[in-house]
Amino acid sequence: MKAAVVFEKGNAPQYADFQEPKVTQESEILVFVKAASIKNLDKARASGKHYSTENEVHQPTIIGSDGVGLLEDGRKVYFFSKKGTVAEKAVADKKMMVNIPEQLDFSTAAALPNAVMGSAMALKFRAGIQPGKVVLVNGATGITGRIAVQIAKVYGAKKIIVTGRNEKSLHALLQLGADEIVSLHLNDEDFKSKIKEIHNETPIDIVLDYIWGHSVEMILSAFKGDGTFSHKTKLITIGGMSGDNIQLSSQIFRATDIQISGSGLGSWTKEESALLFSEIIPEMFQAAVDGKIKIETEDVDIKNIESAWNAEIQTGKRLVVRI
């Protein structure tokens, strides 16, 4: 069969022949793949730099961690696989598979789940979001941040504040459900002052963070209490685009009712992971059908994977390989 294969770590995948996968366990099923999205996770795994590949011995590998396609009975499904997905065929774990509504196109179905994992899991399980909560999405102009804004709305958020550097993308979030924007181009004092002003007027319950680094230092500084009662805020970190380390004063924890946790591969329980496939992704697929969630894609044919791998994709779009 044809597949997108990485022959050496760090190199772009190539359109090449590869041995067809075989179903070896009752828990597995063969999928005829129609599309798969390319994400930062896939690129990090292909380069060998992702923490999930630390103990792997490299050999020619099919890229991709999830995809969409058809089963032998004609059902449209989204599936997850550790054996590669950007290929004509893939083997999926039956427990990590979701039926796709007939009204939902393959490109949207391929692009949406990873962003759902990076937003809904944090909102539902780490933040415990309830209707009426105030949510701040830090670094909201990327794919997952844009989806987070929409999912927060689906979950009933009363107010959504967003931060980012791309001014055009930032303002576009107002059309997707954001209520207020704060530019990361502001100087430190103005940024902290604006966050503090918003927090005083409508106390922020949840911070979803996609970039970490200095912006989080400023947000935490803006939340710092003065010795009187403070509002309970949960900060969930999901990404580290601005760096993995921050300076954090212990006074913030002593003077502020704040809880910091992370959401990502390895942080979810087996029960939470099961609910991702049985409840959350199906719910978000239906929300997409109903027009409550929108995601834009840049579609390429698998034959062009090598040139598309390092191509610059327009901000706010997800690269999807069609097979």
Image (cartoon, rainbow, N blue to C red):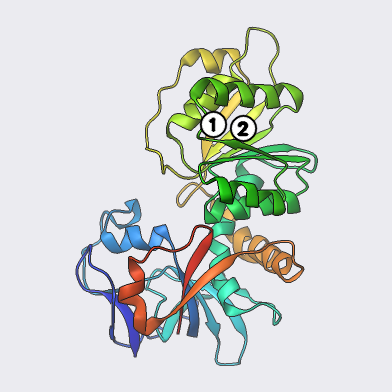
Q: Is there CB contact under 8 Å for labels 2 and 1?
A: yes
Question: What residue is shown at x 61% (from left), y 91% (from top)?
Answer: 74
Identify the secondary structure beneath mark 2.
Answer: strand
Which quarter shows the N terminus?
Answer: bottom left
Question: What residue is shown at x 56% (from left), y 13% (from top)?
Answer: 254
Question: What residue is shown at x 54% (from left), y 56% (from top)?
Answer: 143
Whole-percent x and y of residue 69?
53, 82
Identify the secondary structure beneath mark 1.
Answer: strand
Q: Which mark is residue 260?
A: 1
Q: Amino acid at mark 2?
A: Lys
Residue extending furthest top? 227
Q: Which mark is residue 80?
A: none
The residue identified by callout 2 is 234
Query: How dense is the environment of label 1, judged by Cα within 10 Å: few (below 14), some, or many (20 and up)?
Result: few
Which quarter shows the C terminus?
Answer: bottom left
Whole-percent x and y of residue 262?
50, 40
Ranked by sequence position, the earlier of labels 2 and 1 is 2
